[in-house]
Image (tube, helix red, strand yellow):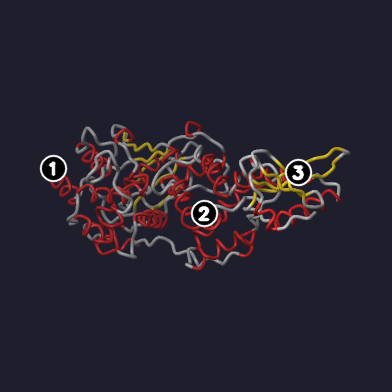
Amino acid sequence: MALTDVTVRQARATGKDYTLTDFDGLSLAVSAAGGKSWHFRYYWATKQKRMSLGTYPKVSLREARALRDEARALVAKGVNPKIDRKQKLRAVRFATENSFKVVYLQWLGHRKLELKEGRQSTLSQIQRIFDKDVLPALGAVSIFDICRPDLLDVLASIEQRRAFTTAEKVRTWLRQLFRFAMVKVAGLQSNPASDLDVVAVPKPPVVNNPFLRLPELPSLLNKLRSYRGRITTQLGIRLLLLTGVRTGELRLATPDQFDLERGLWIIPPEVVKQLQDGMRKRGQRPQDIPAYIVPLSVQAIEVVRYLLEQVKPAQRYLLAHRSELRMRISENTLNGAIKRMGYKDLLTGHGIRATLSTALNEFGYPKNWVDAQLSHADPNKVSATYNHALYVEPRRKMMQDWADRLDLLEQGEVRAASAHLTIRIDGVPMLDEGAGVSVDLIETGASTILLSSVLAAPIKRLSDCQRERIVMLET
């Protein structure tokens, strides 16, 4: 006899277990204590099997019959409903264990093996951007359920606020994450993050860091000399002008990197952004790559020596944080000072490198010398990663010439400071020796190159500006 809702509801405890039978294999089991549960009995491989369909009243009579009908349909198809349910539950549990957030954290842990910590490091960018833009939308979703439209929705929200560079990074990271997941997560067969760039919103033209031309430098140098902020900030900017290093390399400079006896600043490869990228791409270790060698002019040595004399026992970096000696200056310190001097949107710390590069190339210095000084890589050379360790002595003369020209510019001698070089290779006729040209011999190994600064008068090794700075540093 078929059960009714009233019969099921009024079934009472009798002190013994008993069963009320419905039809088509469904029954209600009532325990001695009065608990009620639904069961479905069926035959599989000539043996009777039983599976639970839930408890009453959580599962009503109507719902129990529906579950029974689904199970009977599976039996009719040759599928064991009990095993089918276990497989589905396992799949649900597996999907939960492999949510996007869980896989992301595994991938992030793998990336930490090669990426450095730091406020502006790639690692911190990944964490910050995923926390803001990706995890809120995808974190709880199973990695198996994420498809390309889901990723496009995330990217579209980033592009709508015109954060095109961020969107480009997210596309790259998502592609890497799903490649990782295809190896680590069993059953994941495709990468929905592939080819997302095909429909990416085009990035606007790149706006390079603003920089100054040579005639604009006298004003900057005089404003720098009269800068009323911290002396270490002023000298930090001057050191950027004298060396062309990146602001990050200056911020990470430690006293032990400087060899003033040899006039060298030796920057470990793991500090140099371009070398970090090269090491990751080639799977190299820092000890496999030579340091970034920066020859120092007399003027740069003067600045570094003063800064080293100010180093306190607890100080780790050459340019220490204002309130915490163990920390380096913030990323905004140098750029903020440049803005306060009146160069907002006209110059940045990184733009100083462009200023120096443009000037040295216009003077006529060999491009490979300039690139080595700035730790630029030549994409056409297999050994480009190591260019930063080459041409040290020629670069020393080049950077001394540049420092002397800066002294002239600080005195307003733009014409003299803008004089072009004459470069002579063995056997090639040169200017008349009586033309007042200062000539230096540089041995390159293959041939002798003669460098001459064509100036109206020889540059004094100790300029008036240098004397003023010596007085300033001594007071």
Image quadrant holding the C terminus, namely: top left
Image quadrant holding the N terminus, namely: bottom right
Which of disc 3 and disc 2 is earlier in sequence? 3
How much space separates mark 1 and mark 2, taking CA atoms? 55 Å
Label at residue 82: 3
From this view, report whether residue 211 is shown above or below residue 468. Answer: below
- Amino acid type of the residue tagged 3 in the rendering: Lys
Label 1 element class: helix
From this view, report whether residue 144 is shown above or below residue 315. Answer: below
Q: Residue 169: where, in percent of width, then height?
A: 52, 55
Residue at label 2? Answer: 135
Q: Residue 264: where, in percent of width, then height?
A: 34, 37
Q: Residue at x 51, y 34 (%)?
A: 285
- Amino acid type of the residue tagged 1 in the rendering: Glu
Residue at label 1? Answer: 474
Q: Residue at x 62, y 59 (%)?
A: 196
How much space separates mark 1 and mark 3, taking CA atoms? 88 Å
Label at residue 125: none
> Quick check: 333 left or right of 112?
left
- Amino acid type of the residue tagged 2 in the rendering: Leu
Which of disc 3 and disc 1 is earlier in sequence? 3
Mark 1 vs 3: CB contact within 8 A: no
Q: Residue at x 59, y 59 (%)?
A: 151
